[in-house]
Image (cartoon, rainbow, N blue to C red):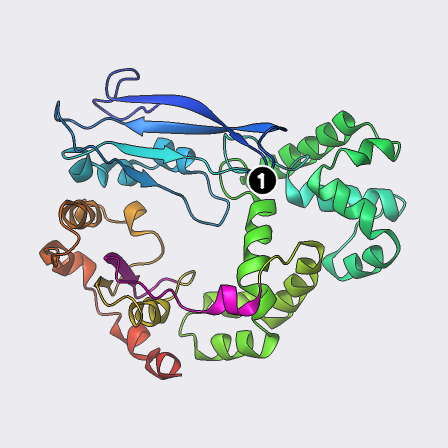
Amino acid sequence: MALTYEGEAEGETYGCGVILVPLNHADPARRVIELVYLGLRSTPLSPAPDPMVYLSGGPGGSALHKISRNAIVSLNMTATRKRRDVIFYDQRGTGYSTLLACGPFNAAVGVVGELYYDRTSVGIEQLEDIAEGARADVLTLLTCAASYQGAGFDLSQVRETMWAIHDLARSMSGGSERTTVSLAVLYNINCAEDIGFTPVDEAQAYFDASPYPGPLTFGIQDYENITLFCRFFPAPFTKDEMMSPVDSDTPALLFLEGLDTHTAYPFGLVAARTLPNSHNVTWPSEGHVMAARSVNGCDGAIAATFLDDPSREPDIGCSQADYDTLPFQSAIESWSGYVAQ
């Protein structure tokens, strides 16, 4: 892992490493896994004692890939590095850290199809049929459980096959689960937190209210298929545990982007209702992940100021530049009825 930006030198301005953590914190004596991190060193000789930790979203994204391939993210760390270190790390099952499944998730589904449909392709609509007759085998394949070896399969060959499928697909589409999003982590978290408690009619209401064309290309049928897919994943939480808002006096900085189709603008307004010490910054003309979009470093400057003193309203003057306030107000205004619900 290397940073190729001007002024960066491994061992001087940044460093990489690995920490070992239990696969299961409830049973720490058993298997351990590796978490890979990259630390950007502060420019002062005496930085603040508490670093900023950058986690990539997705869920399932690679923070190390983002900092090593996106110069705008690096730029937006500049202001914070004048005060403190910044640590990027790939959460378990993502990026360069230990993968928790046998291989890439989409390829795993393909292998299931090979095993159970005599080398014919399998679609999401067929997974329910598979689950009825062979749910245990499917789950152990997808989670790389040790017991799968006992079923007569060479686990190393299964893994090799799935990564070969993945590499072929990547060469055709340009995507990679290591450098984009680990789909096993994506579905595992989204199914447990959101999809499992969001019925289809609520998703339809969101589609109907959305001013963005993107969700229309996704469609409610795709969401119905994903709810079926989620039956393959554990559901460890109750609806109250996952759907109740976070109610906290801890200061928070919320960036609300008018063109964000992933964490939509009204979600930030709703979150702020139970975060009385939150500071909101609205970017009408921007989309998802401001740290990868703010070409003038404004995002990073506001974040650095907030971290210096979270109790004070940060100076957001730079966010009012012409570039960040293009006239896309219609998108924000169209959400008003949805937020009121």
Tell me, yes or no, whether the highlighted magenta stretch contains residue 259: yes
Viewer-nearest residue: 173 or 111: 111
Q: Reply above or below: 306 against 125.
A: above
Looking at the image, which residue is at 70% across and 63% down?
Answer: 228
Q: Quadrant of the N terminus?
A: top left
Looking at the image, which residue is at 26% across and 18% down?
Answer: 9
| Residue 30 lies in quadrant | top right
Q: Position of residue 244 (x, y in %)?
A: 45, 69
Q: Is residue 71 left or right of residue 42?
A: right
Q: Reply above or below: 32 against 111.
A: above
The residue pinned by badge 1 equals 26
Q: Reply above or below: 158 against 244.
A: above
Q: Quadrant of the C terminus?
A: bottom left
| Residue 84 lies in quadrant | top left
Viewer-nearest residue: 30 or 64: 30
Q: Can the viewer see residue 178 in this picture?
A: yes
Return the residue found at the far top. Answer: 11
Q: Dot 1 lies on which element? A: loop
Q: Which residues are magenta?
A: 238-260
Tell me, yes or no, whether the highlighted magenta stretch contains residue 3: no
Q: Is residue 326 left or right of residue 222?
A: left
Viewer-nearest residue: 223 or 16: 16
Q: Reply above or below: 161 against 270.
A: above
Q: Position of residue 264 (x, y in %)?
A: 38, 66
Q: Is residue 130 left or right of residue 340?
A: right
Looking at the image, which residue is at 19% across and 28% down?
Answer: 42
Amino acid on which the number 1 mark rests in the picture: Ala
Q: Is residue 88 left or right of residue 326?
A: right
Q: Can the viewer see residue 1 in this picture?
A: no
Looking at the image, which residue is at 11% across and 57% down?
Answer: 312
